[in-house]
Amino acid sequence: MAADHGLGQHQATLASADPESAEWLRTLGGAGAEREAAVERLHAILLRVAGNEVRRRAPRLRLSGPELDDVAHQAAADALLAITAKLDQFRGESRFTTWAYKFAVLEVSAKLGRHFWRDPGVPLEVEDWERLPDRFGLDPAERSEGRDLLDALHRAVDEELTERQRRIFVAIVLEGVPSDAVAVELGTNRNAIYKAMFDARRKLRDALVARGYLDIGTARRS
Amino acid sequence: MNGWDELDRFLSTDPRDVGCDKALDLLHVYVELVARHPDDARRRYPGIAAHLRACGPCSEDFEGLLAAVSDTI
Ligand SMILES: [Zn+2]
């Protein structure tokens, strides 16, 4: 993956922070009743953002109303703690509130990833290659004419991937386990899972191209 | 788009892709730019744009942050 492409132009200083952001920094970094009031105001904002984010994701989750409320409250509380501890890391590159919203959204994301994993109906180790055509929305005609390609993909997964890449590929692609849940299961993080999948995707594509397979897709498209 | 295109797209990797950590690190900067000037955002941060096209979880987080920002910008 790229090291730093597109990341070079974000230098900013607090001097460039807008007045509202500067006021947040001043009050949250201060003391006494003024700081308490700012913390309370920030918590209310984080709770609103976390609540909206939980509701936005809720239709795809099997969680009840009280569980969702609980996630929103925990996410807001954890985001508040993180923000007040990391005030000096805000570099004025965005509005302060946008930076703060990010903590709330990422806390909701992390907590819902773990919730998925606690669902006992989701096994990680079952390998069902018959599901592969569904994963890519192949219709029956495409399936029969592409049988060779699917077999070649299966073979490439077995032959080209490391054991760890294979395990991650099977969980995410065949079983549809969210990658954050795979990360929790394997005791790692999203970035490491993505990197493993990135390398796996590149190896698999190279293998299929080398065996003359992905020409099928390219020819059909052009 | 047919199923083979979908498979092809899934297996294709973009060398500009910066990965999850770097994309999330600058997500608050990127999202404000997207909210105002989407084309500028993709031009200035091609590595983040490439990542969000390929990474479901980061793209989901981005959508959530964009929704939050859109409420207030
Ligand atoms: Zn990502």
Image (tube, coloured by chain):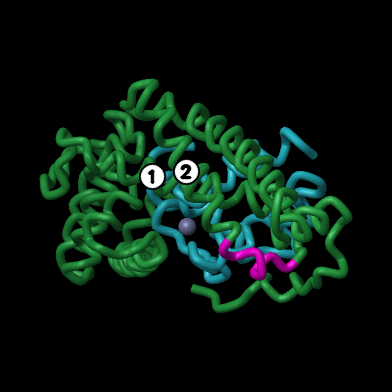
Chain colours: A green, B cyan
Ligand 1 within 8 Å of disc 1? The answer is no
Circle 2 packing at 10 Å, graded few (<14), some (14-19), many (20+), is many
Earlier-in-chain disc, 1 versus 2: 2
The disc at residue A3 is: none
The answer to whether marks 1 and 2 mark residues whose Cβ atoms lie closer than 8 Å is yes
Q: Secondary structure at mark 2?
A: helix
Does residue A83 appear to the left or right of A143 in the view shown? right
Does the magenta run of residues contain B30? no
Which residues lie in the magenta part? Answer: A85-91
Task: Write down the residue under mark 1.
Answer: A111
Q: Nearer the viewer, residue A174 or A179?
A: A179
- List the single residue furthest toward the front: A32
Whether labels 1 and 2 belong to a single chain: the reply is yes
Please identify the residue farthest to the left as the structure is shown: A126
Residue A209 visible here: no
User: Label 1: few (<14), some or many (≥20) within 10 Å?
Assistant: some
Query: In what element is the residue under mark 1?
Result: helix
**Dot 1 amino acid type:** Lys
Most foreground residue, A129 or A65: A65
B52 to A55, vertically: above or below: below
Front: mark 1 or 2: 2
Q: Amino acid type of disc 2?
A: Ala
* Residue A164 visible in the displayed image: yes
How far across and how far down the image is residue A203, in percent?
A: 32, 69
